[in-house]
Amino acid sequence: MTQTAPTTSPRADDEQRRFASLDPRTGEVIAHHPVATEDDVREAVRVARDASVFWSGLGFDGRRARLDAWRKLLVKRLDEAQALISAETGKSADDARTELALVIDHLHWAAKHAPKVLGKRKVAPGMLMYNHAASLEYRPLGVVGVIGPWNYPAFTPMGSIAYALAAGNAVVFKPSEFTPGVGVFLASTFAEVVPEFPVFQVVTGFGETGAALCAAGVDKLAFTGSTPTGKKVMAACATSLTPVLVECGGKDPLIVAEDADVKAAADGAVWGGIFNSGQTCAGVERVYVADAVYDEFIALVTAKASKLRPGGEPGADFGPITMPKQVEIIQSHVADALERGGRAVVGGLESIRPPYVEPVVLVDVPEDSTAVTEETFGPTLVVSRVADADEAVRRANSLRYGLGATVYSRNRGEELADKLRCGMVSINSVLAYASVPGLPFGGVGDSGFGRIHGEDGLREFTYAHAVTRKRFGALLNPMTYDRGSRTIRHVLRLVRVLYGR
C-alpha cells in the first residue's frame, strides 16, 4: 500500500494533539501519540533538570546498578521490542533482532566503563608546577537532548542515550515521527528500574517538537539525520550556545583491491548495501573494484543480489522503505544513472514498487551522477571499475561525506584504510566498527562531527573538570610579583636543560 509522507500531523485528531504511528508494510495504525508543544518540551527539560541532580548523585556504582537492571529488563522483553521495531519500520525480524543485540551490548559497555573513563585521575603537574598535585575528572553536563532517526530507532539514539545516562545526565528524547513507539518503549522500561525521578523522558511529535527541544535549554543536543536538517539544528542551537553532536548521512565506499578475497568482498557488498533495505547511514552505496578482479566480482554480486526479495513477512530478506518520500529519491537516483549511460545488471526502475524496492545494482555510472554523489538510502549499489586500489581511494575521498568505509585486501588493508578520509574503516568485513562498543562512531565533512560509542562517546556528554592543589612551597615560583629576575633566569635555564636538547 502506497502512503504519503506526513507533513504536520498525519492521521492527527484531538485538535492536532495526537498523531498515528503507521505500519509501512500495510498502512495500518499501530498506536496514537501526543504532539508535544513547545511548552510541553520546556516542561520536560525543567523536570529533567531536577532529575539530573538525583541521577548524578547516585555516582557511577549507583547508576551502573540501575543501567544493568534496565539491560536485563530489555533482554527479557526482546520479543516485544523486536515486534514493535518491525511494525514501525517494516524491517525484517532478524534485522530488528540484530539492532537490539547491538543496543544491549553498547548499554552494557557504557555502564561498565564509565567509572574508568570519566572518574577522577591524577595528572602529572609538569616542570613549573612540580609542587602541585593535579587531577582531572569528567562531570555530567546536566540535561542532554536527543533527536533520533527512524532507520535504527533503538540502536542509533541509544548510542547517545545510554552513554549520556552512564555519564550521569538526564535525557529528553525526541524520536522520529515514524517510530515514536520505540522511543516510548525505551523510556517506559527505563522508568520501571528508575521510578523515583523522570531521568529519561520522551517527547513525541514532528519537526516543530524537535525545534522546541533545540531551544528548550538542554545542555547538549545530539542529532542524527540528514545533513540539511543537521545544519538547521546547529543554527537553532547556536542562538543559545547549546553545543551539538551531529551525525549526518554518508555515501560510504567499499574498495575491492587486486588481492582481495573476491567472494568475501561480494558477500560484504551485497549485505552492506541491501540489509535494512539499504536504509543505513554507514551502509555500502559506492563500490570501487580493481580491474583485475572486476568481472569476477560483478558475477558474484549479480548472483547474490538477484536472489534477494523484500517483503512484509518476518522472514523476508528485508522490508519496505520506511519513509514514503524516500522512494522518490531512490527512483530519481536510479533514473539519473540510467539516463547518464549507466546499466542495471540487477533490477532497474521496474524494481521500485512502493513501499518495496527490490535490489538494484548499477554499473558504468558517471561519477557526477546523483547515484554516486548523493545519499540514496535504498537497496542499491553502484559498482565502478577502477585501475587499482589507489584509484579507488582517490574516488572514495572525492565527496564531502566522510562517515565510514570498507576495504577488502589480503595485504594492503591497513595501508589503504590509513589513506581514507572518514571516521571509521572496516577491513575485510562490513560495518564491524559499529559493533565494537569501545570504538567511537562518527564522521567528518558533511557526515557531521562529534562521536558516540566508546570512550569518546562517554566524554561527549561531559565537561572536563581540572583541579590543582599546592602541596608545598616551591624554590622557584615565577607566579608572583615577588619572584625577582633571578627566578626567571633559573626557570629559563631549566627549560634549556630539560627541553632544549
Image (cartoon, rainbow, N blue to C red):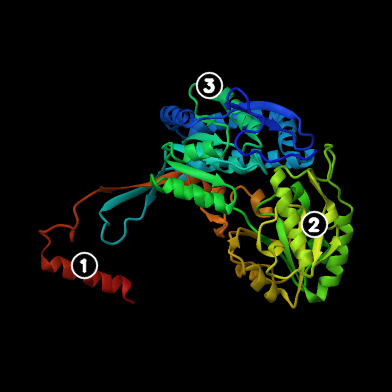
The residue lying at 66 percent from left, 54 percent from top is: 282
Image height of 175 relative to 309, above or below: above
Residue 349 location, quadrant:
bottom right
Query: Could you tell me which secondary element the residue under label 1 belongs to?
Result: helix
Q: CA distance from mark 1 to mark 2?
A: 64 Å
Q: What numbered label is drawn on residue 298?
A: none
Q: Please state which amino acid type lies under the numbered disc 1.
A: Val
Residue 102 location, quadrant:
top right
Q: What numbered label is drawn on residue 195?
A: 3
Q: CA distance from mark 1 to mark 3?
A: 58 Å
Residue beneath label 1, please?
Answer: 491
Residue beneath label 2, please?
Answer: 270
Q: Nearer the viewer, mark 3 or mark 2?
A: 2
Frontmost residue, 51 versus 127: 51
Query: Could you tell me which secondary element the residue under label 2 belongs to?
Result: helix
Q: What x and y, as percent, mark residue 281?
A: 65, 52
Residue 103 location, quadrant:
top right
Q: Please state which amino acid type lies under the numbered disc 2.
A: Val
| Left or right relative to 239: residue 469 | left
Q: What x and y, as percent, mark residue 140?
A: 43, 39
Sequence-wise first label, 1 or 3: 3
Q: Please state which amino acid type lies under the numbered disc 3.
A: Pro
Image height of 188 relative to 450, above or below: above
Image height of 441 relative to 94, above or below: below
Asked whether the residues under the numbered discs 1 and 3 touch, taking CB atoms below 8 Å apart as contact, a structural biologist would say no
Q: What x and y, as percent, mark residue 361?
A: 81, 60
Q: Nearer the viewer, mark 1 or mark 2?
A: 2
Frontmost residue, 473 versus 396: 396
